[in-house]
Image: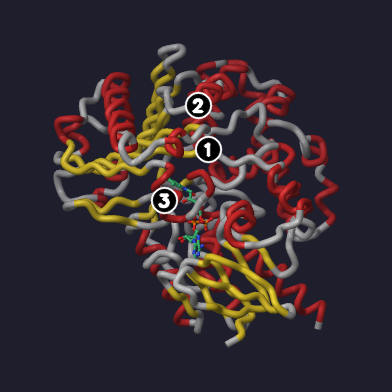
């Protein structure tokens, strides 16, 4: 059988691409290396706990009155997600200044916190909010090839600016910048390298579309989407790891590790170009390699999934999110994140916003640390376990010490995911989880402009490594964005 499209991977990007293509009556096959759909959006069980690997916030989902793009796309397919809008609910500890503060409520409460810190920050916050809206509108025009984007002066002004430059330019005090940009520290992207356009895009989604949590498990989310794709006639073959792509007479031959071969006119990859160039294609041109090598990957992460045998309030875990920073200044902090030997990390307690996250009188606690250099790749089978366990213990000790909440005595289950785990589960290069870094020379605009140039004919990319960048909403939306472009092109070529 000759498929119109074969999609490698059933992560959020791959599933969304499949759904859109199947709706347009294309013959589509998804080849997935694992036995379940969803990629990083999955759930695993240990003892009486079901842990979600990711999906702690859904961005750009919105509420009923003001739905975001993700909700709109899911509604089109009648995919119903159980979600709950969640306010900012976090405690932040800065080791540099010993500052310890809470942010609870919606963005306005966060804003009050920022204004309390620096009374003179109000005009710059107002200005930023209006620029965020303007850049969002221009970006939407740009995405849709609408030249109206040229009517937005701030979009043009800040097109190639880094976030810290732009925030200083609008007169924001340094202390306010540090607090406002907390998220980029844990993501591992210093604001002196972060594209201001991408910053505004994410901030727009966080502020105006709110943050939403799914109250059902991550795997249910992925299964619902896969089910919808299959009900519409799409095929998924699980346990089908693609190992080689070759081309004969303009038809792609896609081989899996078990030596099965499939044929397609087009390939869509829900994995990074770096992975495809390195492991699946032969004779990749120097030009293609150069383009890809010019991009940097987002950092790696190390995650501890803990099942605790008491309720979160009994343990004293009252916030959904805890952040521990070596230094709230992102450049200083991230310079320490080259290896694992630092204190910066975050903690998430799903039960605080979703009582049903684990059985009664138990709590799930997720500790996550980000770093650049993947020390794990140098370890062998003898020292890997020891290294992992020492790192896990240090994170538990840090959380206890700096937030004053003793968790150790409650630990009933513990699962550790290192970059090696992510790499072997979803084939992310180097274990990095947020795709390519969002630097100013690789921001959303550059990716949208160079989208066609970077492509090997009839091979496209979706997911967090593609045009719209990391996070679940972007990975999902990219599936639609890229396939709409391909479908338009098919019509033009007819
Ligand atoms: C700990 C953690 C927490 C996170 N929290 C959040 C959050 O709260 N909110 C948020 O928005 N994002 C979060 N993310 C990021 C988010 O999960 C990802 O950006 C997103 O799920 C990526 O989707 P994707 O489609 O790009 O790729 P993936 O999920 O990586 O899917 C790729 C798929 O391709 C398959 N595959 C790979 N190689 C092959 C091959 N050779 N043959 C066949 N199949 C193959 C894989 O098995 C996988 O199913 C988090 C990530 C992690 C790790």
| 35 displayed left or right of 29 | left
Q: In this view, does 76 lie above or below 168?
A: below
Comparing labels 3 and 2, the label whose residue is closer to the camera: 2
x then y, percent, for residue 363: 22, 42
User: Hey, which residue is sitting farthest bottom in the picture?
Assistant: 1
x then y, percent, for residue 196: 69, 36
Can you identify the residue that label 2 sits on?
337
Q: Residue at x 51, y 17 (%)?
A: 117
- Of labels 2 and 1, earlier in sequence is 1
Q: Does the residue labelled 3 lie within 8 Å of ligand 1?
A: yes
- Marks 1 and 3 sit apart, C-alpha to C-alpha, by 18 Å
x then y, percent, for residue 492: 82, 77
Graded by Cα atoms within 10 Å as few (under 14), some (14 to 19) or many (20 or more), the crowding at tag 1 reads many
Q: Is mark 2 on a helix, strand or loop?
A: helix
Can you identify the residue that label 1 sits on?
299
Q: What element carries label 1?
A: loop
Q: Where's the N terminus, which quadrant?
A: bottom right
Tag of residue 55 = 3
User: Hey, which residue is sitting farthest top in the picture?
Assistant: 97
Q: Residue at x 73, y 60 (%)?
A: 455
Nearest the viewer among 442 and 246 is: 246
Q: Residue at x 29, y 41 (%)?
A: 352
Q: Is mark 3 on a helix, strand or loop?
A: loop
């Amino acid at each position: 059988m000759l498929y119109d499209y074969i999609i490698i991977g059933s992560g959020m990007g791959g599933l969304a691409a499949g759904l859109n293509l199947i709706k347009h009556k294309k013959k589509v096959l998804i080849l997935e290396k694992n036995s379940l759909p969803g990629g990083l959006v999955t759930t695993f069980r240990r003892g009486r706990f079901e842990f979600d690997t990711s999906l702690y916030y859904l961005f750009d989902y919105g509420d009923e009155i003001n739905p975001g793009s993700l909700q709109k796309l899911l509604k089109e397919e009648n995919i119903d997600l159980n979600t709950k809008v969640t306010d900012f609910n976090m405690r932040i500890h800065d080791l540099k200044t010993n500052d310890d503060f809470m942010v609870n409520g919606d963005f306005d409460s966060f804003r009050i916190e920022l204004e309390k810190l620096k009374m003179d920050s109000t005009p710059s916050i107002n200005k930023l909010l209006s620029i965020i809206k303007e850049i969002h509108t221009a970006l939407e025009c740009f995405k849709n090839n609408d030249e109206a984007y040229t009517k937005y002066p701030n979009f043009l002004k800040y097109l190639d600016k880094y976030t810290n430059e732009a925030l200083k330019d609008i007169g924001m005090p340094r202390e306010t910048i540090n607090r406002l940009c907390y998220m980029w520290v844990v993501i591992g992207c210093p604001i002196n390298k972060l594209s201001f356009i991408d910053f505004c895009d994410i901030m727009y989604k966080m502020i105006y579309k709110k943050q939403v949590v799914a109250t059902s498990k991550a795997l249910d989310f992925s299964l619902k989407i896969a089910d919808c794709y299959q009900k519409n006639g799409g095929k998924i073959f699980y346990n089908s790891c693609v190992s080689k792509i070759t081309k004969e007479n303009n038809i792609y031959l896609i081989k899996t590790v078990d030596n099965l071969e499939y044929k397609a006119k087009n390939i869509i990859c829900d994995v990074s170009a770096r992975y495809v160039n390195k492991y699946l294609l032969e004779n990749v041109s120097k030009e293609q390699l150069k383009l890809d090598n010019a991009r940097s990957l987002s950092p790696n992460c190390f995650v501890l999934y803990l099942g605790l045998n008491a309720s979160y309030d009994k343990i004293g875990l009252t916030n959904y999110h805890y952040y521990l920073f070596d230094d709230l200044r992102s450049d200083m902090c991230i310079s320490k994140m080259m290896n694992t030997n630092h204190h910066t990390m975050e903690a998430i307690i799903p039960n605080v916003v979703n009582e049903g996250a684990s059985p009664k009188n138990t709590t799930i606690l997720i500790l996550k640390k980000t770093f650049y250099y993947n020390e794990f790749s140098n370890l062998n089978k003898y020292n890997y376990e020891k290294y992992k366990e020492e790192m896990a213990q240090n994170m538990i000790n840090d959380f206890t010490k700096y937030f004053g909440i003793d968790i150790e005595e409650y630990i009933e289950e513990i699962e550790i995911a290192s970059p090696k785990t992510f790499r072997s589960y979803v084939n992310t290069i180097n274990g990095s989880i947020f795709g390519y870094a969002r630097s100013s020379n690789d921001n959303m605009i550059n990716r949208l402009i160079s989208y066609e140039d970077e492509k090997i004919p009839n091979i496209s990319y979706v997911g967090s490594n593609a045009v719209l960048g990391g996070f679940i909403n972007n990975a999902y939306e990219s599936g639609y964005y890229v396939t709409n472009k391909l479908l338009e092109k098919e019509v033009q070529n007819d």
